[in-house]
Amino acid sequence: MFGLDANILLIVALVAVSAGAVSYALLFSRIETENKTSARISRVKSAESDLSKVKAARDRVQELSKRRKSVQDSLKDLEKKQEERSKKMGDGSLKSRLAQTGLPLTMPRFYMMSGALGVFALVAALLAGIPLIAAAGAAFVAVIGLPRWIVAFLVKRRQKQFLTEFPNALDVMVRSIKSGLPLNDALRLIAADGQEPVKAEFRRVVESQQVGLSIPEACVRMMQTMPLPEVNFFAIVITIQSQAGGNLSEALGNLAKVLRERKKMKAKVQALSMEAKASAVIIGALPFIVALLVYLTSPEYMTILFTDPRGHMIMLFSAIWMSIGIFVMRNMINFDF
């Protein structure tokens, strides 16, 4: 009986396996078709998502290229406009140099002071017993050369003070903009509480806005009284931000950092070139020192240079060659940034 039940169970199991095998054989093609269909659908979906990603990436690249091209075009336009303004302003003229000193100097007042200085030099030379020709030469130098040298010294000193304080003013502007103040208020803050000469320059920017100029135009106009590359950088940043947008506080912060690094590089170059400058000063002063020592020890040996016409010619040609040598050495040890 137990053997019969086992045979029946075995037959049932074999029938079930056979039925499953027959069913799988009959449904295999359908199952394979459904699997292929689902795989094809998943590939199509992934392809569509990839196409959307590629399209989005392409759109981003095109937008970046358009933005970059817009910035490049803006920079080219700014460069052309800056060149035109520089030609119109005449940065090398005496009138613009007087404005760059920050002092209330006008052309008539400058000429009056130069004439008074020349008369004083002529009278002092004649009272000292110097010959008339030499006294006239001293008066000519006092009228033409000395006042312009003083103006150049004042302009350079003011520009140096401006470069020292300008990065700090930019940091104040960055903090003001980050705190929520508009650019106009940030400029007014520097114009009211800044340090000279930055305060005076930003006051001119605010006054230019009050007469109808835009902020970029007012910042570009700062180049009239402070013709420095750093001011040009600032004007370009403001102009590009007004045209193309962007994070102004970040741009000004980067500009302040660049200006500080630029100043450090200038100081490093000056320190490295100090030895050459000292050598140039010694070489330039050595002939005068030797002439003075010889005159103190042997006056009759040097007096002939002042009394004989041939000595006058020798001194003239010596002065010309010394001037050429000093000019060459000055150009060799000075570096522009």
Image: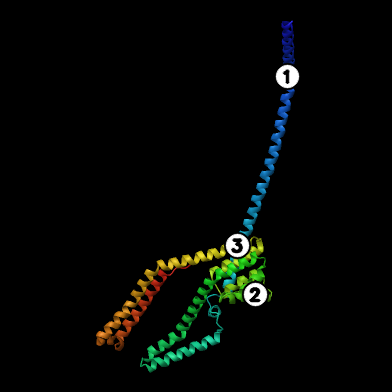
Tell me the amino acid under the disc marked 1: Tyr
* Proximity of marks 2 and 1: CB atoms separated by less than 8 Å: no
Nearest the eye: 275 or 27: 27
Tell me the amino acid under the disc marked 3: Ala
Would you identify the image quadrant in which residue 17 lies?
Answer: top right
Element on which disc 1 rests: helix
Element on which disc 3 rests: helix
Element on which disc 2 rests: helix
* Proximity of marks 2 and 3: CB atoms separated by less than 8 Å: no
Reading the image, the residue beneath label 2 is 206
Q: Distance between the residues labelled 2 and 3?
A: 21 Å
Reading the image, the residue beneath label 1 is 24
Q: Which is more N-terminal, label 3 or label 1?
A: 1
On screen, residue 37 above or below 215: above
Q: At x 24% / y 85%, what residue is drawn?
A: 298
Q: How far apart are marks 1 and 3 (CA)?
A: 71 Å
Tell me the amino acid under the disc marked 2: Val
Image mark for residue 251: 3
Label 1 CA crowd tier, 10 Å (few <14, some 14–19, many 20+) = few
Q: Which is more N-terminal, label 3 or label 2?
A: 2
* Proximity of marks 1 and 3: CB atoms separated by less than 8 Å: no
Q: Is 297 positioned to the left or the right of 58 in the image?
A: left
Nearest the eye: 224 or 306: 224
Task: Please identify the residue farthest to the bottom as the structure is shown.
Answer: 127
Residue 269 position in % (x across, y down): 43, 66
Label 2 CA crowd tier, 10 Å (few <14, some 14–19, many 20+) = many
Q: Is 57 positioned to the left or the right of 291 in the image?
A: right
- Foreground mark, 2 or 1, reads 1
Image mark for residue 88: none
Residue 159 position in % (x across, y down): 52, 74
On screen, residue 131 above or below 69: below
Nearest the eye: 223 or 50: 50
